[in-house]
Amino acid sequence: MTDKILHLPPDLDLFASERPRLDNALTRRIGADPENLERGLAQLVLTVVELLRQLMERQALRRIDAGGLTPEQEERLGQTFLELSRRMDELKSEFGLDDEDLNLNLGPLGNLL
Amino acid sequence: MIELYAIARHPGPPLPDLAQLRAVPSNGLAALCGPAADEGETTEEALWRHEEIVEALMLDRDLLPVRYGTRLADEQAAADAVAERRGELLAALEHVRGAVELSLRVRARSPGRAPELHALRSLARDQVERPGRDEHELLRAAYLVDRDAVERFSEEVARLQDANPELALLLTGPWPPYSFSQR
């Protein structure tokens, strides 16, 4: 879903978490050695998953706010989001990424209105 | 149980071959839905799938996206739900006709003001602009933009970026018109 990005600011760090760090994610993504490449791809995939997770969470929360869900549905959604978070953590540790790595990309997308 | 994905005009283009999609017609409108997954099967894949389906439908028709997890007993219930809000839905569909949602966020290193947005607004049919949630976020906005104006809108954002190098503008989309579906 990176094709969802229509304009990327030159200063991406502003969309990362407040901690200023980060080498250039694009460079990393096209890094020459295969290990880097694989890691870059994983990062891309995780970012997309995270984006969608946040999108769905927000929609679900709106529904809960609007009283559109039964307690059972709320419970189930809560469980789902826990499950998603846990799965994300597994993937991240598998690929040696931390939240900061993901934030670079998902920070902006995660906050879609 | 059936799961709702979107509301659209009826008849519309053929439905994509996904999720056993069906159009439940109701007087010029249709609820686009498919069989609901079993209870308790709300998984990561299911969430993905929902967005994928809405976006596939969005490719060749106007629609009002329905939130994930909207389930109804059967097609009759879907038709009733649409009939009940017919006027509202028609007005909302008219509002988003031929348009998509673009999301813009503006951040800055130091607190300040959002850039002049007049040029962007003039390219959009509608907008929802909200202040940022922290001092470095100057704007969170959604714009309803004609499909064929998306490129111009992006160019305008790039221009705005050039004119305001101290800011970081991030534009994403096209999204289903999440912010413009309730009228």
Image (cartoon, rainbow, N blue to C red):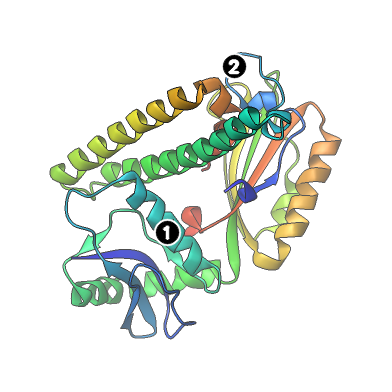
Residue A100 is situated, as x and y percent measured from the top left of the image, at 55, 21
* Among the 4 quarters of the image, the one containing residue B10: bottom left
Amino acid type assigned to the residue bearing label 2 in the image: Glu
Q: CA distance from mark 1 to mark 2?
A: 34 Å
To which chain does the residue with label 2 belong? Answer: A
What is the secondary structure assignment of the residue under circle 2?
loop
- For this orientation, the residue located farthest to the front is A34
Write down the residue under mark 1: B182
Residue B180: give x, y in percent of width and height.
49, 57
Compared with residue B151, is residue A51 higher up or lower down, i.e. above or below?
above
Residue A23, how many percent across, how many down? 70, 20
Relative height, residue B143 to residue B164 (above, below): below
Vertical placement of residue A7 versus A98, above or below? below
Task: Point out which mark residue B53 bears.
Answer: none
Q: Find residue B108 and report its horizontal and vertical position in percent.
A: 70, 25
Mark 2 neighbour density, 10 Å: few (under 14) some (14–19) many (20 or more): few
Please indicate whether residue B132 sits to the left or right of residue A67 in the image: right
Q: Report whether A25 appears left or right of B79.
A: right
- Report the residue marked by disc 2: A18
User: In the structure shown, which secondary structural element does the residue marked by tag 1 occupy?
Assistant: loop
Q: Quadrant of residue B166?
A: top right
Residue at screen point 55% across, 73% down: B60
The residue lying at 35 percent from left, 30 percent from top is A85
Q: Give the camera-side residue of B73 and B164.
A: B73
**Amino acid at the residue labelled 1:** Gln
| Circles 1, 2 touching at the beta carbon (< 8 Å) | no
Assess disc 1: are there few (<14), some (14-19) or many (≥20) residues with their C-alpha within 10 Å of its C-alpha.
few
